Image (tube, rainbow, N blue to C red):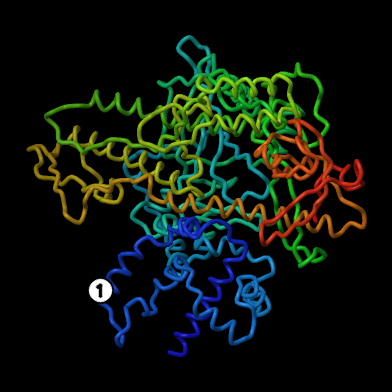
C-alpha cells in the first residue's frame, strides 16, 4: 500500500505539472488526449462491473491503465495532498517548480509532449524486436521474383546535413526508342520499411502505436527504434531495399500514365548529397556534365512546377508565401541553462524574391511570379516527391486494366483490389465571395507588404484536405490525384500504403502462378498476402501443372488495411510540434531582449485585421519569421503598414508574448536581419 500510494502520488504530481500553460476549455483538453483513452472506457466499465477491492470500486485498483485514467481525468487529488503537506502552493506552476528542484524535470521540460501521452521511449520488447528484424533475411518479394536489381542506376539522396532518416533517392534512366531516339525515365526510390516491419511484426506494432515521428526543436521522437532506422534508410555505398517508382513525362509536364512502373527493388545509393551540395554542383556546371542526372532532374522539376501552376496550384495562387522560422535548441556549454537556441527562416516556395526574411522587398511588381525558388535543389526534390505521389495514385488505373485483362472464369484467384489513401482538396470557393476575392486580387496586384498580405488573406479560401479511398483532385497541389507514400520511416500512413501496394503485387504474382499451374513457393505465408495461401489439391498426370483451392482459415481472416488507423495520434502530434516551436521561439525572444542593454525593436508588417472593434491585427516580424497578434495602440492600421515594435512581455512557459510600439525607429539589434543563436 505504501509503494502503491507513493506511485499514485508521484504520477499525480507529474500530471499536475504538465498542466502548466494549458489553454482552452476542459472539454478541449480532454479532446487533445482522447487518443490515450482508446480502450480505457471498456476496461473501466469491466472493472466497475466486476472488480471490487474491500468494498471499493475497481476504479481504485492500481494497474497499467491507471496512468491513462490520470491523464484523461487530470486526477490531482493525491498531488494536491502532497503539496499541502509540503506547505507549497497547489498550482501547476508550483508543482512544476518542485519537480525541477528535485531533478525529475529540467527547466525546459517539454510538458506539452508529456501531456500528449505520445510514447517518448521504446520498450525493451520493442527494441529487441527491432534487433531481431535486422537479422531476419527473409524476403517474400525476392521469393516471388518481384524484387528487381536496380543497382545499375546512379542514385542520389538529397537531404539536409542533419537528416538521420533517409527515405528517398532519385535516378534517371535513359531508354532507347525503336527509331533510335532516347527518352528519360525518372525513378523515385523510397526506403522499403515494410520489408523490415511487415504488418504481422512487432516492429510494425511499435510504429502503429506512434503513427508518426515527432519533430521538435530539441530533436526527433522517432516512429521506429533508432536501431532499425539505420538499416531501413537509403544509406550511401551499401545495398538497400526500396520500393521504386519509374515514370516518364509528356512534353507539357503531364505524366505518361502508361509509363508508370512500381517494383520492390535493390538499389545502391551513389552519393548522399545535401541541398547546398546540389545547388553548388548545378551552379558550377557539374550537374550538367559529370552528374548530368541532376540537371535532368531539375529540368523535369521545372517543367512539373509550371504544369502544376497552370492547373491552379498554391505556388501560382500564392506566389509569395510568408517565410516561417524553424527553431532549434541544442546543448551549449556557454549558453544560458546549457541550451543554445537558434532560428532559421524557410519558405515552402517563392517567386524568387524573398531570398531572406529581410523587410527590404523589391518594389517592382513586374517580377516573374513563377520564377525558380531560391534553392534549385529544393525545387528538384519537392517536385520529384510530388510527381511520385501523383504517379502512385494514377498507377491504380494501370493495375485495374491489367486485372480486367486477366479475368478468366476457369481459374481460381485471390481477390486483389488495391485501395489507397488519396489526399484531396476542393478548389477555393471564389464565386460566392466576390467582395473578398476583389480584396485578395488587389493585394496580389499591388504586392502589398511584399506579397505577404495577399498570402495571409488568401488562406481563408483554402478548403481542408481530406483523406479517402476514392480518387479526387488536389486543388492546392494542382494534381489529378495524390497519395503520400514517400516517408514510410516517419509516417505510418505511408508505411500502410507501401504494404498495400506490395501486397497487391504479391497477390498478382500468386494469381499468375495459379493460372499457369505453377508452384507457389512454400515460404509464402499468410502475413505476406494478408489472406490464406491457396492449397494444392491436384497435380496433372505429367506433374507439370497444379490445381489449387482456397481454404479460409478462421485464424487467417483477410487483413484489411485501415488508413484511418493512427489518425487520432497524428492529429494529437500537430499541437505538440506547434507549441514546442512556440515555446522555444518565445525563449529565443526572451533571451534576445534580456541580453541587450539597449532597447530591442523589430521591424514588422501589418498582414491584416483580425478584430476591427478591438483593433487586433495579424503582424509579421521579419527578423523572427514570426506571425503574431498585435493590439494596436494607435487605432486603425493598414495592411502592409510598417511598424517598429518592442517586446512588452513574454512568458514561454505560459505561451505569452505581447508587443508594444518602440520608442525609436530602429536599433542595432533590429537592423540586423540575421538570426544568431541566443
Residue drawn at point x = 29 percent, y = 74 percent: 48
- Disc 1 element: helix
137 shown above or below 456 = below
Mark 1 Cα within 10 Å, few/some/many (few <14, many 20+)?
Answer: few
Q: What percent of the width, then of the height, locates residue 90? A: 60, 77
Q: Is residue 201 left or right of residue 80?
A: left
Q: What percent of the width, then of the height, locates residue 549? A: 12, 43
Q: Nearer the viewer, residue 82 or 273?
A: 82
Residue 134 visible here? no
Residue drawn at point x = 50 percent, y = 24 percent: 429
15 shown above or below 668 = below
- Is the N terminus in the top left, top right, bottom left or bottom right quadrant? bottom left
**Farthest front residue?**
613
Residue 297 falls in image quadrant: top right
Q: What percent of the width, then of the height, locates residue 596? A: 89, 56
- Is the C terminus in the top left, top right, bottom left or bottom right quadrant? bottom right
**Farthest left residue?**
541
* Number of numbered tags placed on the structure image: 1
Q: Nearer the viewer, residue 249 or 449?
A: 449
Q: Is residue 337 left or right of residue 159?
A: right
Residue drawn at point x = 50 percent, y = 85 percent: 6
647 shown above or below 40 = above
**Farthest top residue?**
179
Q: Nearer the viewer, residue 439 or 624?
A: 439
Q: What percent of the width, then of the height, locates residue 642? A: 81, 35
Q: Is residue 58 left or right of residue 247?
A: left
Q: Is residue 16 left or right of residue 198?
A: right
Q: Which residue is mark 1?
A: 49
Residue 306 visible here? yes
437 shown above or below 637 = above
Residue drawn at point x = 52 percent, y = 53 percent: 573
Amino acid at each position: 500500500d505504501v509503494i502503491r500510494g507513493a506511485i499514485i502520488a508521484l504520477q499525480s504530481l507529474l500530471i499536475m505539472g504538465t498542466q502548466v500553460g494549458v489553454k482552452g476549455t476542459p472539454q478541449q483538453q480532454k479532446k487533445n488526449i482522447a487518443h490515450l483513452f482508446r480502450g480505457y472506457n471498456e476496461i473501466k466499465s469491466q472493472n466497475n462491473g466486476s472488480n471490487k477491492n474491500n468494498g471499493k470500486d475497481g476504479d481504485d485498483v492500481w494497474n497499467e491503465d491507471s496512468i491513462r485514467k490520470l491523464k484523461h481525468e487530470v486526477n490531482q487529488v493525491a498531488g494536491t495532498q502532497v503539496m499541502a503537506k509540503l506547505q507549497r502552493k497547489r498550482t501547476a506552476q508550483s508543482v512544476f517548480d518542485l519537480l525541477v528542484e528535485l531533478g525529475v524535470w529540467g527547466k525546459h521540460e517539454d510538458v506539452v509532449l508529456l501531456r500528449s501521452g505520445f510514447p517518448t521511449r521504446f520498450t525493451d520488447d520493442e527494441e529487441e524486436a527491432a534487433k531481431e528484424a535486422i537479422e531476419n533475411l527473409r524476403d517474400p518479394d525476392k521469393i516471388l521474383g518481384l524484387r528487381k536489381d536496380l543497382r545499375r542506376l546512379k542514385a542520389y539522396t538529397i537531404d539536409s546535413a542533419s537528416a538521420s532518416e533517409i527515405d528517398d533517392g532519385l535516378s534517371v534512366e535513359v531508354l532507347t526508342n525503336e527509331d533510335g531516339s532516347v527518352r528519360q525515365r525518372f525513378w523515385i526510390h523510397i526506403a522499403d520499411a515494410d520489408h523490415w516491419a511487415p504488418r504481422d511484426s512487432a516492429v510494425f506494432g511499435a510504429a502503429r502505436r506512434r503513427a508518426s515521428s515527432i519533430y521538435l526543436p530539441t530533436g526527433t521522437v522517432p516512429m521506429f527504434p533508432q536501431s532499425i532506422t539505420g538499416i531501413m534508410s537509403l544509406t550511401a555505398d551499401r545495398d538497400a531495399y526500396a520500393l521504386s517508382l519509374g515514370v516518364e513525362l509528356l512534353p507539357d509536364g503531364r505524366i505518361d500514365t502508361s509509363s508508370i512502373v512500381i517494383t520492390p527493388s535493390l538499389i545502391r545509393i551513389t552519393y548522399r548529397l545535401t541541398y547546398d551540395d546540389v545547388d553548388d554542383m548545378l551552379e558550377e556546371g557539374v550537374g550538367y556534365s559529370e552528374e548530368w542526372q541532376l540537371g535532368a532532374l531539375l529540368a523535369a522539376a521545372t517543367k512539373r512546377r509550371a504544369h502544376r501552376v497552370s492547373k491552379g496550384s498554391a505556388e501560382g495562387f500564392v506566389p509569395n508565401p510568408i517565410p516561417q522560422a524553424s527553431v532549434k535548441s541544442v546543448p551549449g556549454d556557454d549558453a544560458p541553462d546549457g541550451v543554445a537556441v537558434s532560428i532559421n527562416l524557410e519558405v515552402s516556395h517563392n517567386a524568387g524574391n524573398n531570398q531572406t526574411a529581410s523587410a527590404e522587398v523589391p518594389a517592382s511588381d513586374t517580377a516573374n511570379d513563377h520564377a525558380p525558388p531560391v534553392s534549385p535543389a529544393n525545387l528538384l526534390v519537392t517536385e520529384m516527391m510530388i510527381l511520385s505521389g501523383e504517379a502512385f495514385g494514377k498507377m491504380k488505373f494501370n493495375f485495374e486494366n491489367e486485372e480486367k485483362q486477366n479475368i478468366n472464369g476457369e481459374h481460381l484467384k485471390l481477390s486483389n483490389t488495391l485501395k489507397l489513401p488519396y489526399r484531396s482538396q476542393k478548389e477555393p470557393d471564389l464565386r460566392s465571395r466576390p467582395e473578398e476575392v476583389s480584396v485578395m486580387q488587389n493585394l496580389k496586384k499591388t504586392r502589398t507588404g511584399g506579397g505577404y498580405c495577399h498570402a495571409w488573406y488568401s488562406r481563408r479560401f483554402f478548403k481542408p484536405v481530406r483523406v479517402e479511398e476514392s480518387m479526387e483532385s488536389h486543388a492546392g497541389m494542382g494534381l489529378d490525384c495524390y497519395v503520400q507514400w514517400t516517408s514510410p520511416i516517419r509516417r505510418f500512413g505511408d508505411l500502410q500504403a507501401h504494404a498495400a501496394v506490395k501486397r497487391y503485387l504479391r497477390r498478382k504474382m500468386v494469381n499468375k502462378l495459379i493460372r499457369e499451374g505453377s508452384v507457389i513457393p512454400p515460404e509464402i505465408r499468410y502475413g505476406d498476402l494478408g489472406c490464406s495461401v491457396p492449397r494444392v489439391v491436384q497435380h496433372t498426370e505429367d506433374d507439370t501443372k497444379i490445381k489449387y483451392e482456397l481454404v479460409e482459415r478462421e485464424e487467417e481472416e483477410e487483413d484489411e488495411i485501415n488508413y484511418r488507423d493512427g489518425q487520432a495520434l497524428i492529429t494529437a502530434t500537430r499541437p505538440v510540434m506547434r507549441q514546442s516551436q512556440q515555446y522555444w521561439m518565445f525563449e529565443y525572444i526572451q533571451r534576445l531582449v534580456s541580453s541587450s542593454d539597449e532597447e530591442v525593436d523589430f521591424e514588422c508588417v501589418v498582414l491584416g485585421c483580425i478584430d476591427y472593434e478591438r483593433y487586433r491585427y495579424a503582424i509579421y516580424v521579419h527578423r523572427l519569421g514570426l506571425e503574431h497578434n498585435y493590439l494596436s495602440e494607435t487605432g486603425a492600421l493598414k495592411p502592409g503598414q510598417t511598424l517598429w515594435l518592442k517586446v512588452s512581455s513574454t512568458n514561454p512557459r505560459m505561451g505569452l508574448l505581447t508587443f508594444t510600439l518602440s520608442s525609436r525607429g530602429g536599433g542595432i539589434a533590429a537592423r540586423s536581419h540575421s538570426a544568431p543563436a541566443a
